[in-house]
Amino acid sequence: MTGLFLINILLALAWGAVTGSFAEVNLLFGFLLGTMALYLIREQAGSDRYLRRFWLIFVLAMTFVYELVLSAVRVASIVLRPKIELKPGIIAYPLTVDRDFEITMLANLITLTPGTLSVDVSDDRSTLYIHCIDVPDKQATIDDIKNSFERKILEAFR
Amino acid sequence: MTPFLEIAVGLVLVIGSAFSLIATLGLLRLKDVYMRMHAGSKAGTLGSGLMLIALAVHTGEVDVLTRALAGVVFFLLTAPVAAHLLAKASYEVGYRPCSDTHIDEMGKRDT
Amino acid sequence: MSGLAEFSSAFLDVCVNISLAVLTVAFVLIVLRIVRGPTLPDRVVALDMLVAVGIGYIAAIGVQTDYFLYVDIAIALGLVGFLATVAFARFVLNRGLARDPTIVDEIRETELREGRSKANVAGSAAPQGEGAR
């Protein structure tokens, strides 16, 4: 996996050398070209999984931005209501991911999503405590996170 | 700089500052420190990020744009960390969430 | 075409001024929250927000003056603001665990304010009183 990434960087550098410019944009373009080249030989070089992971990380990043905008709009709609009636709560979320990096990622994503803010991780790393700004149904919130973010993180980094 | 880009920059600036104002209103109107963090960490991040991107697009130079994008990514990564640290610290110390809080599963665990 | 260009630069000017005005209102409201408190974490959240508004200011002024070095200043300010918030969080934690009198008083106040209805919170655990630690 890392080998293919290095090859991709090497291809980008080669592109920079051939075109005679090591400007960031040109290198980025070379990187994209290298990815395309790896796509063409995906069956011979086995780069299928590598490209798939690339794509999944990209999808994850896009989800991140989308959810941030959504949550900002939702917070805005809550704040601008003439009368604020909310049922906040701190819920325990059972974690499926177990690596530090993935937990950090998930906690960050949760904080930037509508109405949730991660407060603490239990010492055995099995539970994430989340403060919700409005939680009429605890299980619905948990299912929501399970089905969107945690699944996407598992797909992208496993 | 094309006219349409200029108009877009202006609109993004206004939208970004509006989000900042909304985050501030949230800071004033919400009831306890945990709920105020929601407003600050989401709408606030989006507001300043949008305005930074508007500045980068306005300058129209690629290296400035990459720097601004790196800055926005940096804000996106740090805002949740800051909110999480502060929420954790205030909960550990014993600041209670407001009385509307109807579930508190963190209180159940053995500390 | 030049008519459109004139309109767009005038529009941008108006937009920059509007956003500066909006940010100023936000600034004043945040200062209000910092003064009102009521607790130390509230003030820290407000200070964090103050930094975000400051970044907004820098961006708007950068657009107004066409001076793109402001991007770097904004990023540096974001870094400093993040570190400050982290330091404040550590401060709240350390002082709180050391039972700093000011913080203990604040906590007792919040418990008085919120604690009364704590008993009828359905299914929630027994609150950890002051003596729990």
Image (cartoon, grey):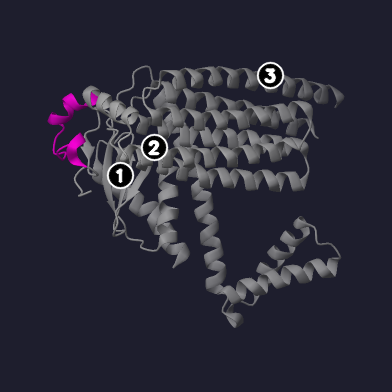
Q: Secondary structure at mark 3?
A: helix
Nearer to us of marks 1 and 2 is: 2
Query: Residue A87: which numbered mark, if any?
Result: none
Q: Nearer the viewer, residue B92 or A151?
A: B92
Relative to A117, B9 lies left or right: right
Relative to A3, A14 lies left or right: right
Query: Given the image, what chain letter belongs to the residue carrying mark 3?
Result: C
Dot 3 and dot 1 within a common chain: no
Q: Quadrant of the N terminus of chain C?
A: top right
Residue that protrudes farthest toward the bottom in the picture: A44
In this orientation, does residue A86 appear? no
Q: Considering only order in the chain, which callout, 2 or 3, is on the residue closer to the N terminus? A: 3
Name which quarter of the figure residue C53 lies in: top right
Mark 1, residue position: A141
Position of residue A158 relative to residue B12, above or below, is below
Position of residue C126 relative to residue C107, above or below, is below
Q: Which residue is rendered at x = 41% and y = 53% of the image? A: A106
Name which quarter of the figure residue A153 lies in: bottom left
How far across and how far down the image is residue C28, in percent?
53, 17
Q: How many marks?
A: 3
Mark 2, residue position: C92
Amino acid type, callout 2: Val
Mark 3, residue position: C17
Relative to A143, C61 lies left or right: right
Query: Given the image, what chain letter belongs to the residue carrying mark 2?
Result: C
Amino acid type, callout 3: Asn
Q: Secondary structure at mark 1?
A: helix
Q: Does the stretch in magenta take in B78?
A: no
